[in-house]
């Protein structure tokens, strides 16, 4: 009885949680101040593009980082969101916000169609299939009249939220900042639920995951669908931010960029993935002084990075945060034999005794 | 019917090889049933058929009187038939606690809405599951390791963690594939005590084991396999003196 109280009280010690909260808050405030420091449109443009890549990387992180499925066609879902919004807003005069939901719906349907038959494939084969899917979506965008062919869709109206019209780089910077925060929080919630655990199990050992009662093909499909949803929402906001979209923005190189952001940052790590996206977007810009050689410099840097930190800049950390509970449990068992006490495990009694 | 899990005329073929032929093994409720036999006798194949990892070529698997032949591994696990693996399969990049929580996957029933907004009910179920995971770890003597990476655990501890991962699911039948293989004598003693406790709590335990001393010590029932067939079954002391068993292990006596 009193032991349990000790446990309760110990759990209430929230030191690490407070520290984490302060970190998140500090990062948010710092990010929110960026547009106040400069009015250079070029910098702001790069900054919101970096945020956009963060959103995409957070989406792909669910598929690659959590569930361990290599997806080389993630830009397809980005394209689906952007094109759905582009078409609905220019041809049907929908508002941008209203066009997000249909974009998500199309993305989810596509994810189901592609995912259902292919997700039972193991990594390498899956990579090839998703690569093909990415190419198919781009080819469709190039050849369809409704998508504007190779020139794409232009004169996409600005994003309006209530009576606020978002029409500047600064405005989109803040819109994407909100999106990044929402995606990051959502990813964190998923990670620390049965969904996240099931995905990690699949990534770590799919056969053993089945022994946990995890329906692996369902959970792989869920991961793919969540990735599609985040990718599509990002696309829907990207279309008005650039006011014009064309198939060239949604090719294999874009997919690869997203994979790179996730891998450089650290598979499965929220901070890592966001940082990786920033690196991938900003470094090539920083190296502009090298002119023609800038991508070469960037490439060399990436190779060095992967040699020095093979698990990414900020690798995923194992789930912690029950230190207090463990200490309480230990205090309870102290001085007793390491192995079993029957009364302590009454909850382990099988339910079925018939 | 007293058999909780049973097979009837179970056969498994890989190409032309008969891995299992015509196995009819009843596993009694409340038994601690050991499956022994020389290497290649088909013990693990038998487990794989029971747990949905292999689909038997012919024959029937029944659980609580219902046929479960051909169900996939996840569905079998959901019924309360849980297993460990011969070559230990932990989720190395997850903490020990999370490995055990994963074992309780089906008992965490929060929906997406609850997960997204982390409401009080979600927190409550997660906390409850976490406490049970810690209780399972306590049961196998691994609480101290809860926050460590499963991949960093030494071999014997991984075995115990696998057991905790099985227990949190509140299984009806536990299938252990060589629980004592390759562990030190101290760890062996701990393991055998844990297994015995699990059994005493009313869970039916089936184990494949090479360690004959361990089998004689804790098993209530023994089935001996050789070349995919049952060559003997019964109480441990009877099986030990069975000439067929001795022949299977020692080879035929010279004339």
Image (cartoon, grey):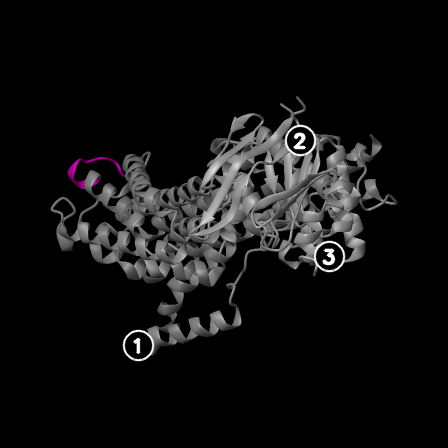
Q: Can residue A346 be seen at all in this image of the molecule?
A: yes
Answer whether labels 1 and 3 touch (C-beta < 8 Å): no
Q: Earlier in the sequence, mark 2 or mark 3?
A: 2
Question: Which of the two marks, 2 or 1, is nearer to us in this view?
Answer: 2
Label 2 packing within 10 angstroms: few (<14), some (14-19), many (20+) = some
Question: Which label is found at residue B183?
Answer: 3
Residue that badge 1 annotates: A291
Label 1 packing within 10 angstroms: few (<14), some (14-19), many (20+) = few
State the extent of the magenta-drawn residues as a range. Answer: A89-96
Q: Does the stretch in magenta take in A90?
A: yes
Pointers 1 and 3 within a single chain: no
Question: Which label is found at residue B188?
Answer: none
Q: Could you tell me how far apart the alpha carbons at marks 2 and 1 are, in whole angstroms?
A: 77 Å
Answer whether labels 2 and 1 touch (C-beta < 8 Å): no
Q: Could you tell me how far apart the alpha carbons at marks 1 and 3 are, in whole angstroms?
A: 61 Å
Residue B179 at what x, y percent from top left? 69, 49
Residue A197 at what x, y percent from top left? 54, 44
User: Which chain is disc 1 placed on?
Assistant: A
Image position of A259 with respect to A114: above or below: below
Residue that badge 2 annotates: B28
Residue A142 at what x, y percent from top left? 16, 53
Pointers 2 and 3 within a single chain: yes
Q: Does the stretch in magenta take in A279?
A: no
Front residue (pair B22, B183): B22
Label 3 packing within 10 angstroms: few (<14), some (14-19), many (20+) = some
Q: Residue at x 46, y 63 (%)?
A: A264
């Amino acid at each position: 009885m009193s032991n349990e109280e000790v446990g309760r009280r110990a759990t209430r010690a929230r030191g690490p949680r407070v520290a984490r909260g302060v970190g998140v808050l500090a990062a948010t405030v710092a990010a929110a101040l960026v547009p106040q420091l400069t009015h250079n449109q070029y910098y702001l443009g790069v900054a919101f593009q970096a945020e956009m890549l963060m959103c995409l990387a957070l989406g792909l992180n669910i598929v690659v980082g959590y569930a361990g499925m290599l997806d080389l066609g993630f830009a397809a879902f980005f394209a689906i969101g952007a094109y759905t919004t582009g078409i609905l807003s220019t041809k049907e005069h929908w508002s941008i916000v209203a066009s997000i939901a249909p974009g998500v719906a199309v993305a989810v349907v596509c994810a189901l169609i592609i995912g259902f038959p292919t997700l039972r494939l193991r990594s390498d084969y899956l990579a090839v299939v998703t690569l093909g899917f990415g190419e198919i979506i781009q080819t469709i965008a190039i050849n369809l009249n409704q998508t504007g062919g190779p020139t794409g869709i232009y004169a996409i109206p600005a994003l309006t939220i209530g009576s606020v019209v978002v029409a500047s780089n600064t405005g989109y910077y803040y819109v994407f900042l909100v999106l990044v925060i929402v995606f990051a929080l959502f990813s964190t919630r998923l990670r620390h639920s049965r969904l996240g655990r099931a995905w990690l199990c699949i990534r770590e050992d799919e056969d053993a995951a089945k022994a946990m009662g995890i329906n692996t093909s369902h959970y792989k499909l869920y991961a793919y669908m969540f990735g599609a949803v985040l990718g599509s929402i990002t696309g829907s906001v990207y279309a008005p931010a650039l006011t014009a979209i064309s198939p060239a923005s949604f090719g294999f190189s874009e997919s690869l960029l997203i994979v790179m952001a996730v891998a450089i940052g650290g598979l499965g790590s929220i901070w890592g993935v966001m940082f990786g996206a920033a690196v991938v977007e900003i470094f090539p810009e920083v190296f502009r002084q090298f002119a023609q050689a800038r991508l070469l410099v960037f490439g060399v840097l990436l190779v060095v990075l992967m040699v020095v930190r093979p698990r990414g800049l900020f690798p995923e950390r194992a789930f912690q945060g029950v230190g207090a509970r463990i200490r309480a449990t230990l205090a309870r068992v102290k001085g007793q034999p390491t192995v079993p006490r029957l009364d302590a495990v009454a909850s382990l009694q099988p339910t079925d005794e018939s | 019917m007293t058999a909780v899990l049973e097979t009837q005329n179970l056969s498994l073929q890989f190409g032309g090889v008969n891995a299992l032929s015509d196995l009819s093994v009843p596993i009694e409720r409340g038994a601690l049933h050991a499956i022994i036999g020389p290497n290649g006798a088909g013990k693990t194949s038998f487990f794989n058929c029971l747990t949905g990892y292999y689909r038997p070529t012919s024959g029937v698997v029944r659980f609580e009187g219902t046929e479960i032949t051909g169900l996939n591994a996840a569905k079998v696990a959901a019924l309360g038939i849980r297993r460990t693996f011969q070559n230990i399969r932990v989720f190395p990049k997850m903490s020990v606690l999370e490995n055990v929580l994963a074992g309780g996957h089906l008992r965490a029933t929060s929906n997406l809405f609850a997960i997204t907004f982390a409401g009080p009910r979600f927190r409550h179920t997660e906390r409850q599951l976490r406490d049970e995971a810690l209780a399972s770890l306590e049961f196998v003597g691994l609480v101290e390791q809860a926050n460590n990476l499963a991949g960093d655990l030494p071999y014997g501890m991984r075995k115990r963690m696998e057991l905790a991962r099985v227990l949190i699911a509140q299984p009806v039948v536990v299938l252990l594939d060589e629980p004592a293989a390759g562990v030190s004598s101290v760890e062996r003693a701990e393991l055998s005590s844990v297994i015995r406790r699990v059994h005493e709590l009313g869970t039916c335990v089936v184990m494949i084991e090479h360690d004959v001393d361990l089998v004689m010590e804790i098993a209530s029932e023994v089935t001996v396999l050789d070349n995919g067939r049952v060559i003997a079954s019964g109480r441990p002391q009877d099986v030990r003196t069975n000439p067929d068993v001795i022949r299977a292990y020692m080879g035929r006596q010279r004339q």
